[in-house]
Each structure stands twice: as structure tokens, then as C-alpha cells.
Amino acid sequence: MCDDLTASALRKSSMSAALDRRKFTALGVAGVTLAGCAGTVGGGAGNGGSDVAEKAVSITTADGVCDAFYVHPVSGKYPAVIVWPDIAGLRDAFKVMARGLAAEGYAVLVVNQYYRSTPAPVMESFSEYRTPEGQEKIKPMRALLEPAAIMRDADAFVAFLDNQSEVDRARGIGSSGYCMGGPFTVRTALARPNRVKAAASFHGAGLVSDEPDSPHRLLGKTQASFLFAIARNDDAKQPEQKDELRKAADAAGCKAEIEVYPADHGWCVPDSPAYDPNAADRAFQRMLALFAGL
């Protein structure tokens, strides 16, 4: 869906542009900057409300060194979550989202999926992608993200998290992904089925295709429970997706929640033109319910 930029979507994007700094402050950035060193910020809303510590990290993979954002409660051990950003990559919007999840009691790693090409941020906001220049910039980076590459990365990310003192290794690892990151959560669960026990896809693209390794065909090879939150305009374009996901999950014996949300592609991400705070909060609560089983 990210590639299907209608004229109206482009106009909306160019008019609204990115979420400005004042809106980010309202969402809880609270003036915290990384600059390569750790920081601490007060906990967000929700049942957790923990203070969190954050830092930039570097993770050695089979293909190089991935830069990432790591945030967790300031004390104790917690289940870990790997977050795959949307097509515009790791940026402030995903740091805001990660802080909120960490405050609920998770050690959260948001990865730069484009590390083979450039450090994050590749783009400052989603609106940059919503231009011909932005799409051309992303195209060669995206081409490197073949299924096998995502599997190698996921293996390295799990290994990194399992070496962190904040991570409770007696609990499973979760994964969440947005847009192009949606199917990456399934491949993460496939890469380390003994560790990744829950995967949440939000307005995920490419979950169901005719390819032999289409994500929906892989569910039975994992040990994870799933949440597939589908955008209404994605459903309008591919109405069979939800049914194929349901059939695949049932055939595999996987626990899977599959729902079409009354919101458009990108609704969960605060700098997206389609951001819908009410639908985003519902999706977040459903993710928390999924990850409670880790």
C-alpha cells in the first residue's frame, strides 16, 4: 500500500507534512535527545507507567552493523520486543512509540532496516517518502531487504536482546511491524521460533501473495501468536487477505487475531497523514494483550 500513492494522498501529505515538534512534545518526547548517549524519560500513560532509559546501540549482523534505538524500564528484567518501522525507517515517530511500549514493561529495540545502505534516520518524517524523490531514495535500499536478509537480521537482533541485562530470557520475545515491517514480524518469528512467541502486524503490506514463501504460508513453521491489524483501504484493495490469513492460521493451529480497522494505511504512526489516535490506541491495547502472553 505504501507504493500506491494516490494524488489525493500526496496532496494531503504535502499540506500536512510531518508531525511538527510541538505535537511530538505532546506525545511525550519531552526534549530527550540521544546524541549517542543514554537518557532517561518519565513513563507514559497506561498500566505500566515506568520510567525508561534509552540509548543508541550498534548490532553486528551477518551483513554489517545495524544501528538501532533501545529503550527499557530503568530497573528490573522484562520481555523484549523487536520493532520494524514502516517504509520511511527509524525516526522520531518510532522512538515516541517505543517509549510508550517500554513504559508498559518491555525492553524495546527499534531497528534501522536500511543499515546496509545508511545510518538512520533515512528520512525525518513519513511525508518525505510521500514524494517522488523520497520513493526513489528508498527504492535501492528496499531492494536489499530480501526474506533471507530479514531472517539473518532477526537472528542477530534476538541474540543482541538476549545479551542485555534488562531482558528476561525466561519470557518470550515479541515483534511488531508497520507497513513493510508487518511481514518482517512473521519472518522474525520464523528465524527464531524458540524465542519469538508473538508477532503484531499493523497495516502490513505483502502478507499474502502467490510466492511460496509468502508470510501467510509460514505461520505453521513458527511458535508465535499473531495480531494482524488491517487498514480499511488495504482491505478494499485486497479483500481476500484477511480470509487467507484466517485460513492459514487455522490450518497451522496458530492463535491469530485478524481485524480490519476503520482507519487507513498508516493509522498507527504519529507522523503519517493517516494517523488516527483513537484507532492507534485500540491497536496498541490489542498489542499489549498479545504481548502479555510472552
Image: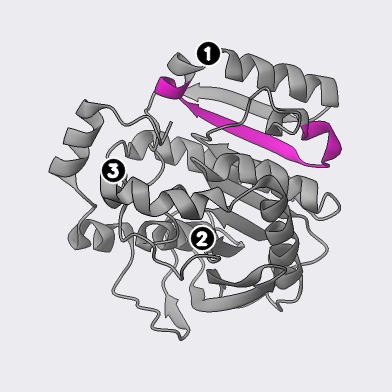
Tell me residue 36's x, y (percent).
44, 84
Tell me residue 76's x, y (percent).
67, 75
Residue at 21% from the left image edge and 40% from the top image edge: 13
Please, what is the three-letter code of the amino acid marked with disc 1? Pro
Residue 231 shows which numbered tag? none
Q: In this view, does 280 lie to the left or right of 105?
A: left
Q: Can residue 131 be seen in this view?
A: no
Label 3: state its secondary structure.
loop
Q: In which quarter of the image is residue 221?
A: top right
Label 1: state its secondary structure.
loop
Q: Is residue 119 above or below residue 288?
A: below
Q: Are marks 3 and 1 in contact (CB under 8 Å)?
A: no
Q: Earlier in the sequence, mark 1 or mark 2?
A: 2
Q: Is residue 124 left or right of residue 153?
A: left
Q: Nearer the viewer, mark 3 or mark 1?
A: 3
Residue 239 shows which numbered tag? 1
The residue range painted magenta reads 218-234
Q: In this view, does 26 lie above or below 143?
A: below
Q: Which of marks 1 and 2 is in front?
A: 2
CA gap, disc 1 and disc 2: 30 Å
Which residue is under mark 2?
A: 114
Q: Dot 1, how many residues are within 10 Å of its Cα: few (below 14), some (14-19), or many (20+)?
A: few
Magenta span contains residue 231: yes
Q: Residue furthest left?
A: 15
Please, what is the three-letter code of the amino acid marked with disc 3? Arg
Q: Which of marks 2 and 3 is nearer the N terminus?
A: 2
Residue 130 shows which numbered tag? 3
Q: Is residue 50 left or right of residue 271?
A: right
